[in-house]
Image (cartoon, helix red, strand yellow):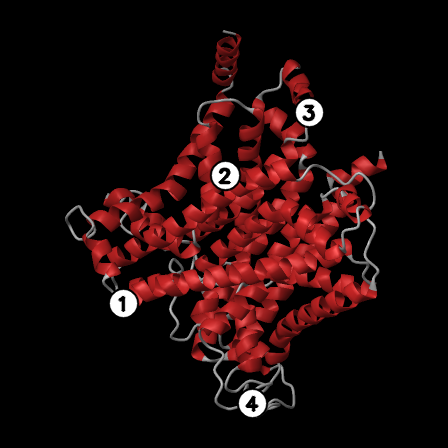
Amino acid sequence: MARGQGAALDRKKLLADPILVTTIVLLITFLTLFILYPLAILLVDSFVGDGTFGLGIFKRIFAMKSFTRAITNTLKIGFVVGILSALIGLLFAYVEVYVRMNRFVGGLFKVVSMLPVVSPPFVLSLSMIMLFGKAGLITRFLLHIYDNSVYGYWGIVIVQTLTFFPVCYMMLKGLLKNIDPSLEEAARDMGAGRWKVFADVTLPLMLPGLGNAFLVTFIESIADFANPMIIGGSYDTLATTIYLQITGAYDKAGAAAMAVVLLCITLLMFAVQKYYLEAKTAATLTGKASRGRMLIEDRSVKVPLTIFCALVALFVIMMYICVPIGALFPTWGYKFFPLTGKWFKLVFTRYHGFKAFKDSFVLSLIAAPVTALLSMIISYLVVKRKFKAKGFIEAVSMLAMAVPGTVLGVGYIRGYSGGLFHTGVLQSLYGTGLILIIVFVVRSLPTGTRSGISALRQIDKSIEESAYDMGADSFKVFMTVTLPLIKDSFLSGLVTAFVRSITAISAIILLVTPSFLLITVQINEFAEKGSYSLACAFATILIIITYGAVLLMNLFIKYFGTSRKIKED
């Protein structure tokens, strides 16, 4: 009875606040139109795209050898990349948390964790081709190997592993830091060796987290479009097959069905990661360490682990350094000296560089604050308010995390090229900058929402209730009380959304029109043509822009963020 009275009171408070009701309605409309609707249209096209309802389209695409081969290739790459990334990430995390490192190695780790964040997702493919391709600097000119080919399965695996293992490293580092050292020290006191302690104590405690890291990387790998497109050669994956089906074969119904298959795989893995492994991780790891950890100083353990991780880190850094250097060579593969800046000049004089950077920068700059504010509003509603549609808002906003960019792009084409349900309504969105901004917002929304939910759960509800008691409405409370308290999460979501937007490619390559030139699309286009120096020039400028944005925002958070004020008080 008390529960029913509480629900009635919550409903009465909600209806008495028109601003809150309007916000919820607008939010549900946005999420339905731009996340659920495109995916629903893909399902409809998959079953009735040939004019009759049934599985005819699925039967047709599964009869295509290229499609079944693409599924096998995608799953094979996903599992291998997931395992390798999780293992290398675990090794890096273990060395940082358990081994006493010198400052140089620690600095390398920080650089490695930052580089994939501020660079386009396919930069390492460019580096791999330029260093180890048929005209590679190392293979052809240093080792005089002429018959090698870096394209194909192993090229994709190596590039994706080097791109995604820092994500696993950052995830597992936090898990290892939360393990209470007394559990491991108790095993050591009973005579267990270091390997025995790791195998019987440390590994079981972090096994759910390790599985979580594997699944996150697996999802990223099978959804990746740019790396297989550039370095895959004739080795097709689902993402590239969908792209070619819609741009080469003009088979929109077939592409929609393929996109549904890819979506089903990612949703299955996302469900396992979200509802099984995350729950087990939360139940296994308990809070902060009770005391400081005794770092390993045994040279037999410290030296080989540190050397291996340092070599991997240096190799990754070398791959990234290759990009700006490659943009300075006169002709890649034939003439390397003297260094020249002609490619940077050509970017802006012949290849519309100013327009590409302006369009990318402006669209990302618009999308970033919208994403950050929308994320905080969703987080506020999910954590602080009670209403029936709360579960719907949380689930749909997080759904975008499991939707591959290529799938979302096909959904927007099928959903808006002819208007809503082919009625012409909202057809004017298609081909405009607004639809690109919406895609940027949708793709970055889950990251900001997760950050906001974590921050809001640390705020005592009595702080906001006192503002309500003084007569403030929901909008006033959110803007003057809640948002200032989660300023750090808001600013972090802002810069993350900007970086993800300006470096995005898979979701927007199918939607961008000649009216807009985006940097990542330009880089992909020149890389496919073999104009690696031009691609490197574009990529170098993009990395400088994104890294500069991250530095500026970090400085802003340091000097104006909530955490600084709390420390000063």
Q: Which mark is residue 460?
A: 3
- The x, y position of residue 137, in whole percent, is 59, 85
Of pointers 1 and 4, the one earlier in the residue sequence: 1
Residue 275: give its label: 2
Residue 9 pos. (x, y %): 52, 11
State the residue position of label 1: 65
Q: Nearer the viewer, residue 290 or 560?
A: 290
- Closer to us: mark 3 or mark 2? 2
What is the CA distance from the residue labelled 4 to the residue labelled 2? 49 Å
Residue 230: horizontal and vertical position, in percent?
46, 72
Instruction: Determine which residue is flagged by label 4.
Output: 140
Image spot of residue 183 (x, y percent):
75, 42
- For disc 2, the neighbor class at 10 Å (few under 14, some 14 to 19, many from 20) is few
For marks 3 and 4, give the CA distance.
Answer: 63 Å
Q: Earlier in the sequence, mark 4 or mark 2?
A: 4
- Quarter location, residue 71: bottom left
Q: Is residue 349 above or below residue 38?
A: below
Amino acid type of the residue that numbered disc 2 sits on in the rendered structure: Tyr
Q: Is residue 503 visible?
A: no
Q: Which residue corresponds to the image point at 46% horizontal and 65% vertical from the top-left? A: 226
Report the mark closest to the observer, 1 or 3: 1
| Total numbered circles | 4
At x 68% / y 31%, what residue is drawn? 458
- The answer to whether residue 341 is above or below residue 187 is below
